Amino acid sequence: MQDIPGPAIYRISFYLRQLETLQRASHETVSSKELGKALGYSDAQVRKDLTYFGQFGHPGVGYRVEELIQRLKKILGTDRVWPVVLIGAGNLGRALMSYKGFLRKGFQLAAVFDADPAKVGRRFGELEILPMEKLQACVHELQVRMAIIAVTPEAAQSVVDLLAAAGVRGVLNFSPTNLKTPPDVYVQSVDLALQLEQLSFRMSMGAGPPLAP
């Protein structure tokens, strides 16, 4: 893993998504040129990225779509279902609870927690919001290793500390703050405002002045 560039790992997810699109369209094979063109990458980039993870493709055929999907899922660890807990049942948390795409990608939202007594006990579909006091027991019982944080920046560090102590080793963080974690706990942050800032920058630099009011 230390020898594999982060961007290459990132692009594997895009390759998988495009392959699944091809599979739904009944494509049985695809070339590196076709796969790269669909995503804005060169065929050399596609081949180089895949080479980090092993040998792929067949002479005169290219890549068999179904076969490559299964191998990329194994690389990403999504060839099985991961139970995931969600911390935070506010507006963003409820939106995440309603999202139907987790299970299709190998992630099952197993439990939801919140520190607000007014939210505890409420149900959203099959999920009941649980108190934070039950977090550690739930993580152990369901063998949870991944969590999603959708809490205020002020609460995020204490929440990730609880998760790490309970045995969670992967955290998807929607709270706009930097988190300190032990070396064996991985955090992937999603900062929506930051992403909008980056989009604004690209538009400002490449799309000319904003429209007049």
Image (cartoon, rainbow, N blue to C red):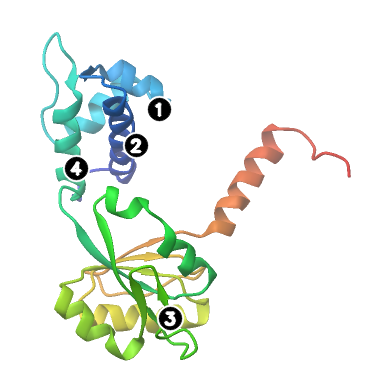
In the image, what residue occupies the spot 47% across and 84% down?
Answer: 119
Count residues near mark 1 (Cα–Cα under 10 Å), then give few for <14, some for 14-19, many for 20+.
few
| Residue farthest toward the top in the current orientation of the protein | 60
Q: Which structural element holds mark 2?
A: helix
Which residue position holds label 4? Answer: 73
Q: Which structural element holds mark 1?
A: helix
- Do the CB atoms of the residues marked 1 and 2 lie less than 8 Å apart? yes
Residue closer to the observer: 98 or 147 = 98
Of tags 3 and 4, the one toward the viewer is 3
Q: What residue type is labelled 1?
A: Leu
Q: Earlier in the sequence, mark 3 or mark 4?
A: 4
In the image, what residue occupies the spot 21% across and 31% down?
Answer: 50
Q: Quadrant of residue 60?
A: top left
Q: How many labels does the image show?
A: 4
Count residues near mark 2 (Cα–Cα under 10 Å), then give few for <14, some for 14-19, many for 20+.
few
Q: Is residue 6 above or below residue 23?
A: below
| Residue farthest toward the right in the current orientation of the protein | 213
How far, Cα to Cα, is label 3 from label 1?
A: 42 Å
Q: Which of marks 3 and 1 is nearer the N terminus?
A: 1
In the image, what residue occupies the spot 33% across and 43% down?
Answer: 10
Of tags 4 and 1, the one toward the viewer is 4
Which residue position holds label 1? Answer: 39
Residue closer to the observer: 86 or 174 = 86
Of tags 2 and 3, the one toward the viewer is 3
Which image quadrant: the C terminus? Answer: top right
Q: Which structural element holds mark 3?
A: loop
Q: What residue type is labelled 3?
A: Arg
Which residue position holds label 2? Answer: 14
In the rendering, which numbered label is found on residue 104?
none
In the rendering, which numbered label is found on residue 122?
3
Q: Which amino acid does label 4 sit on?
A: Lys
Q: What residue type is labelled 2?
A: Phe
